Amino acid sequence: MAGWLRSVRGRCGLSGAWRSATRGCVTRAAPNPESQVLASTERKSFIKGHPLPFSAFLTDSFGRQHTYLRISLTEKCNLRCQYCMPEEGVPLTPKSDLLSTQEILALARIFVQQGVDKIRLTGGEPLIRPDVVDIVAQLRKLEGLKSIAITTNGINLARQLPRLKEAGLDVLNISLDTLVPAKFEFIVRRKGFHKVMEGISRAVELGYNPVKVNCVVMRGLNEDELLDFVALTEKQPLEVRFIEYMPFDGNKWNFKKMMSYQEMLDSIRQRWPDLEKLPTETSSTSKMYRVPNFQGQIGFITSMSEHFCGSCNRLRITADGNLKVCLFGNAEVSLRDLLRSESSEEELIQTIGAAVGRKKKQHAGDGKLPQKTTQGPLNERIKRLYSKTGSNTHTILLRSNGRFYLPLPDFIKTRPKILVLPLRGFCSDPKNLNPDPTCLNNKLESSAEPTTDRQSDTHNPSSRGTSEHLTHVDREGKVFMVDVGAKLDTRRTAVATAVVRLGPKLFHMVRANQLKKGDVLTVAHIAGVQGAKLTSQLIPLCHNIPLSQVNVSFKLDDARFAVTIGAECSTYGKTGVEMEALTAVSVAALTIYDMCKAVTHDIVIEEVKLESKTGGQRGDFHRQPKPSK
């Protein structure tokens, strides 16, 4: 093997005769009857029909030419990002089974000779490999290689970037999923936020333009920071790339956490409606946009909602030398074993070509990625009701605010009658002493046809006026969601507080950060912010409000051995944020309890209250302090 590697290193390319032969050769991979692939003769015709010389070995059965190679330099990483790796890490391959520097360079030369013009170095975290600068410098010498890129978490970037730039690094991608230091530590399970920000600043100083920032967007975790990330591009040459949350082994992927490209785009356009789309290359994975007059730009990598398999030009080599033709595929071919068995160049290239030829049309041949559904919980409730009502029920409708929710699942479409379930109301009229008022009627109503809004005005709360006592309850006791559409947008704020009494022992453990579960106050801080953002999903009649700010703070009260929690929420909109502030302190308090219950259950949550609110038709509110005794 050593002699073969020396031979490869000593040449700038394959011999002219061999190169000429390989440019005209087609890999004869076994056809896949389940895939709509081009026949061997069609593949030859496709390749011959393209005037630019390109290796047949890097052209797959769908005519995709693979010019982009990603090489993993290491499996190790100095972070434990929640979407990427389990907290305990992953089993590492023995060092002897990993590619050596010589083997990495030998494979890179072969791929560049066949037409690859861009190489990206990845990991793990590539910058923890001691010889990464030398690898970049050696790759820079390859004739025909146009671009060398690195994807890094940025922890070691500021220190190493000057040498990497001098060695020939062209493109830089830095992973950063939040602009909140405490949340950064929560997501990656390590410290280092300020080092990443320093690395980004250093890249700008050294002239990288654009500096690409990769942000994996996870619903309920960092989707509230979309606008903050876009704002970064106003005065800096940054390209923030929002990546849809994807499933990988060990990241406990949940579809509910995935926020689609279209949702992200709609959210950003509410703030910047004149967002303009930019042209991109056919093989680009990113849909590019720019806010007019902003120095940088943003992009969306839509691996889940709108895959880009049709233009995929990427191949991957893992740290242990396996060739992967698809990120989502399990099939791998060991190039390391071929190198170490002293296989010839021809055998190596034939193996590469066969693997590329077997590449599927999309996502490793699986065109059925998980689809989002919003009917799961509803269907489960219907199934339980169906099992109780017997065989005479045709369809079950859940009625709320005069609306009927359809369509319904197939398992209840074969019965003759309609069962309407009204949501139970609450009667707020103190003069109504009827022990069985209408608003407490929870009996099932039957009819031959479902009632619609037009057929009965009694299902429309606005037709009956509002209660003098509760805005969410009408005069008949029916619950409804207040229509705020006619209200003016105003600046609204709210402050709430709560107290968690811990007792002396637990209080000092929290102060000293000695809990086995981790940093109690950091986790509670993140939970409070998340609670504020999810208030409308927890409190049924709350509106979904675009919060402009959520501040959660903690004060350690030595006198009472307690933690005082404060939350301030603000928005510019049509309704207030009292519930968001109250939810924030409540969820933060419950999180403290959950983090500490292993030590003692003698924890008291008390004094959850609204301290102040501003804005709205009913004016401001400020709680008066209790007079001192």
Image (spheres, grey):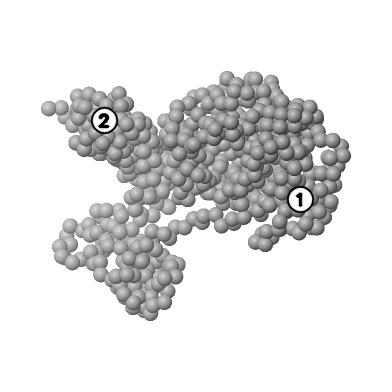
Q: Are marks 2 and 1 in contact (CB under 8 Å)?
A: no
Where is residue 570? Give x, y as percent. 39, 38
In the depicted view, which residue is nearer to us: 321 or 261?
Answer: 321
- Horizontal side of 542 relative to 135 (left or right) equals left
Which quadrant, please, contains the C terminus?
top left
Identify which residue is drawn at 51% across, 42% down: 217
> Could you tell whether 217 is left or right of 581 in the image?
right
Residue 314: x, y in percent? 67, 43
Residue 352 appears in which quarter of the rendering? top right
**Residue at image point 20% right, 66% down:** 437
Does dot 2 land on a helix, a strand or a loop? strand
Q: Is residue 178 left or right of residue 292?
A: left
Q: Depth check: 200 or 37 in front?
A: 37
536, above or below 422, in the image: above
Q: Quadrant of the N terminus?
A: top right
Q: Report the front residue among 79 and 346.
A: 346
Q: Which residue is mark 1?
A: 27
Tell me which corner region of the image, top left, top right, bottom left or bottom right, holds residue 483: bottom left
Residue at the location (67% across, 32% down)? 104
In the image, which disc is placed on residue 563?
2
Asked if residue 392 can be seen in this view, the reply is yes
Which quadrant of the view contains residue 129?
top right
